[in-house]
Image (cartoon, coloured by chain):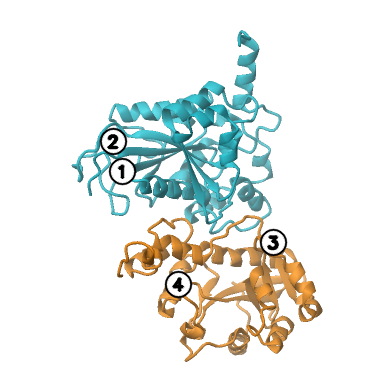
């Protein structure tokens, strides 16, 4: 298999993962299949980056639980891993900064070099949440070294794309940087409004070549909100989340009416930050 | 505490292959029946259809049974029963229901005392066997010649239906449109599944035929089995390079 000329891609998904569900995991599979099928890219890794507690979203449980659940969920995946950098920061970190952090890490070559295709067994090492050492794999690459540094792209669902229009949730310059410098892979239900949304935004329109819309033909609407609701009502969440995640949630009684009340009355971190920055900045242009 | 009626849920279908959505049907149905306060679901049975049903792309029943077994390895209340698939020819759903009810009768007769370690709130009464299905099945009752009228009646009158909603279907409407279903609507339980999860086996087969990932839509063990046995890999290649499997 000749991979020279293909751009290597790392898919990065940011989010609460409160909890992680089969839908989140599907995003990665769909994103990978899509990018690989273009013939121009080769997806070498997927990174799940749960948001830090300082995000202050309602119902957000402590990061260490969300990290562990994500690790359990990706235990038997050969290419997905969980990264704790974002969640370990004291303050909430903008998504563009998380992208930048991971891109810089790739540029300095401190991540595992890609070896074989995800179809084959790879006894790779996954970094556990309490170890943050860089992993220097002793294995030799099996394929000719592809050109350039792997590119990080933001993987998301249509809800994130559409959240760009929520006032003060995103900085305009951040959105621009995300689509101009990194790229978006947006998995949407077939026939959704994502294309219309891109059309109606000058910034997104200008960088549309860097926005990949992936059709999700098998509708799989397993939102974490609904999972938490089902748990509060004593309903089963089996087959909606990986078994290990379901067992962990049950064992630690993570989600109940109390947990859902966390951060009630607290302003979401990006809103807090962007509104106060707007107040203090000079209103030019 | 009032004793609940013990219930066994039976799902018939192709299970070609079994998916997380099939498995969800059981979970949703069980939650729904428990919520009524009247029932205690004690068992779930998956009964894959016989090969001679003649449905397009149906892989051999021993594969479908094996995949369902793998999918249910981690379930403590649902099991596969190959009886229907092992018969000489296709048999009507009502006969499958009758068979399993007589099996329940036999095993009940053998058990002197109800197992105390099992559900304490279930009475010693004979469990009721109910057909578990998606709302789309209710609609198929209207298809001419697909079901015998007397069978539909027997199913809803003597057994009962637990019907899990599916997008694009209006089960209440189907019930009101049919005199038989209307008459026995007290025996038709409509369970709502608010989490849209349209993992149709047809789409799964198509994805597999195109070499796309189906991970997290079916249990991993089932995916491995499909790969190891080369199932579902010659679907859409006809349009393309004419791959011979």
Q: CA distance from mark 3 to mark 4?
A: 26 Å
Q: Which residue is mark 3?
A: B192
Quick check: do tags 1 and 3 share a chain?
no
Q: Nearer the viewer, residue B192 or A20?
A: B192
**Tint applied to chain A in the drawing:** cyan
**Mark closer to the chain start, 1 or 2:** 1
Q: Chain of mark 4?
A: B
**Mark 4: which secondary structure?**
helix
Q: Chain of mark 2?
A: A
**Mark 3: which secondary structure?**
loop
Badge 1 vs badge 2, beta-carbon distance below 8 Å: yes
Q: Which residue is mark 2?
A: A135
Give the foreground label among 1 and 3.
3
Q: CA distance from mark 1 to mark 4?
A: 31 Å
- Residue A78 drawn at (x, y percent): 34, 49
Q: Is residue A271 visible?
A: yes
Quick check: do tags 4 and 2 share a chain?
no
């Amino acid at each position: 298999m000749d991979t020279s000329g293909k751009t290597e891609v790392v898919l990065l998904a940011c989010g609460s993962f409160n909890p992680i569900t089969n839908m989140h995991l599907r995003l990665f599979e769909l994103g990978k299949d899509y990018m690989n099928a273009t013939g121009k890219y080769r997806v070498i890794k997927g990174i799940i980056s749960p948001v830090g507690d300082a995000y202050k979203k309602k119902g957000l449980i402590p990061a260490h639980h969300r990290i562990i659940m994500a690790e359990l969920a990706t235990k038997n995946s050969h290419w997905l891993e969980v990264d704790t950098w974002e969640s370990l920061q004291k303050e909430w970190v903008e998504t563009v900064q998380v992208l930048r952090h991971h891109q810089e890490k790739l540029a300095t070559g401190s991540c595992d070099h890609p070896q074989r295709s995800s179809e084959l067994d790879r006894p790779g090492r996954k970094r556990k949440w309490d170890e943050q050492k860089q992993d220097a794999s002793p294995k030799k690459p099996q394929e000719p070294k592809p050109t350039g540094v792997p590119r990080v792209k933001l993987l998301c669902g249509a809800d994130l794309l559409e959240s760009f229009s929520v006032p003060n949730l995103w900085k305009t310059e951040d959105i621009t940087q995300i689509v101009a410098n990194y790229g978006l892979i947006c998995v949407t239900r077939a026939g959704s409004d994502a294309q219309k949304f891109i059309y109606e935004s000058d910034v997104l329109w200008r960088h549309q070549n860097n926005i990949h819309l992936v059709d999700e033909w098998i509708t799989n609407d397993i939102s974490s909100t609904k999972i938490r609701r089902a748990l509060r009502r004593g309903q089963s969440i089996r087959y909606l989340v990986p078994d290990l995640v379901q067992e962990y949630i049950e064992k630690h009684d993570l989600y109940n009416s109390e947990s859902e009340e966390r951060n009630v009355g607290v302003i979401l971190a990006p809103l807090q930050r962007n509104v106060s920055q707007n107040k203090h900045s000079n209103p030019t242009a | 505490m009032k004793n609940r009626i013990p219930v066994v849920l039976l799902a018939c279908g192709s299970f070609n292959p079994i998916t997380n959505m099939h498995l969800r049907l059981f979970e949703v149905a069980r939650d729904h029946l428990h919520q009524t306060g009247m029932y205690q679901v004690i068992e779930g049975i998956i009964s894959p259809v016989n090969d001679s049903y003649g449905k397009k792309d149906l892989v051999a029943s021993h594969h479908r049974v094996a995949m369902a077994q793998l999918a249910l390895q981690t379930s403590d209340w649902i099991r596969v029963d190959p009886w229907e698939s092992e018969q000489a020819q296709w048999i009507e759903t009502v006969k499958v229901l009758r068979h399993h009810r007589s099996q329940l009768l036999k095993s009940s007769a053998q058990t002197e005392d109800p197992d105390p370690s099992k559900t304490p709130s279930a009475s010693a009464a004979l469990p009721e066997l109910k057909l578990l299905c998606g709302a789309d099945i209710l609609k198929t009752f209207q298809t001419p010649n697909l079901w015998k009228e007397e069978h539909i009646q027997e199913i809803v009158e003597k057994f009962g239906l637990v019907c899990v909603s599916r997008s694009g279907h209006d089960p209440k409407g189907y019930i009101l449109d049919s005199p038989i279903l209307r008459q026995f609507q007290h025996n038709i339980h409509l369970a709502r599944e608010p989490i849209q999860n349209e993992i149709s086996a047809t789409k799964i087969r198509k994805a597999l035929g195109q070499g796309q990932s189906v991970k997290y839509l079916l249990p991993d063990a089932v995916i491995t089995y499909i790969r190891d046995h080369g199932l579902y890999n010659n679907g859409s290649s006809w349009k393309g390079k004419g791959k011979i499997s």
